[in-house]
Amino acid sequence: MSGHSKWATIKHKKGAADAKRGKLFNKLARQIEVSARAGGGDIDSNASLRTAVQKAKAGQMTNDAIDRAIKRGTGEAGGDNYEAITYEGYAPGGVALLIDVLTDNRNRTGADIRSALSKAGGSLAEPGAVGWQFKRQGIILVEGVADGDELMLAALEAGADDVADDEGTWRVVCTPSATYEIRETLEAGGYKIISADTPMVSENLVPVTSVEDAKKLLRILDTIEDNDDVQDVFSNFEMTDEVMEAAAG
């Protein structure tokens, strides 16, 4: 599991996701609005909207809130026009960052991202400087697995490409389009899902060995992710559990 995946899992287990549920719902609603505006409000014919809705449901967003977001996107209710932008940058130590945003003010968001990076010793990069290192994958994290062989069989039969045990947390890898269907299959089989998402993943990992550098990196990730316009942040750092736990405090 990459360092970024480990950090996301730690925050989830500590309840950080629950503490920021309102902010999360706002981001999910924005994704639904943009997808509905681009391809219409029918989830059966709009694959992007279907994915956004599945992600919202996985985040425990209510059906009423999802319906309202779709209506804002299709123009049945008031809504803003958002622009999708991906910023590329570097955190301290040369860690690569991809930052996906949906914004109604490009200048404001760009300034916020630049400021967050520079204050922590990072920097923005030119388009293409970082993105080539990443590819999108479907990743489902499962915990409390009693029989790994049974999970592997169930996941592979559902369409997964790989299943691996990461120190008690099982990682199911698949194509992005199959992620949420496989999640539903595993949940129906009684498995406890920690998360199911389609992140951008890099095989070019950058080791972070200093606790001080790790603190700076995790601080910059938290600051960027806390921005209302930021939808996702992806990075390629590698960090031992000991360094991450020390840095997380």
Image (cartoon, helix red, strand yellow):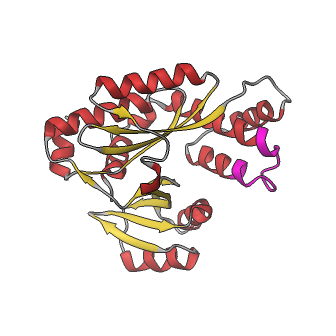
Q: Residue at x 47, y 60 (%)?
A: 140
Q: Is residue 235 above or below residue 181?
A: above
Whole-percent x and y of residue 35?
Answer: 72, 42
Q: Is residue 194 visible?
A: no
Whole-percent x and y of residue 50?
Answer: 71, 52
Q: Residue at x 57, y 48 (%)?
A: 58
* Number of callouts: 0
Whole-percent x and y of residue 173?
Answer: 46, 67
Asked if the stretch drawn in magenta spans residue 210, the answer is no
In the image, is 12 to the left or to the right of 24? left
In the image, is 222 to the left or to the right of 193? left
Q: Is residue 202 visible?
A: yes
Instruction: Write down the quadrant of residue 18 in the picture.
Output: top left
Quadrant for the N terminus in the image: bottom left
Whole-percent x and y of residue 178?
Answer: 60, 65
Quadrant for the C terminus in the image: top left
Q: Residue at x 27, y 29 (%)?
A: 121
Asked if the stretch drawn in magenta spans residue 43, the answer is yes
In the image, is 183 to the left or to the right of 168? right
Q: Residue at x 82, y 35 (%)?
A: 74
Q: Which residues are magenta?
A: 37-50
Front-most of 60 and 90?
A: 90
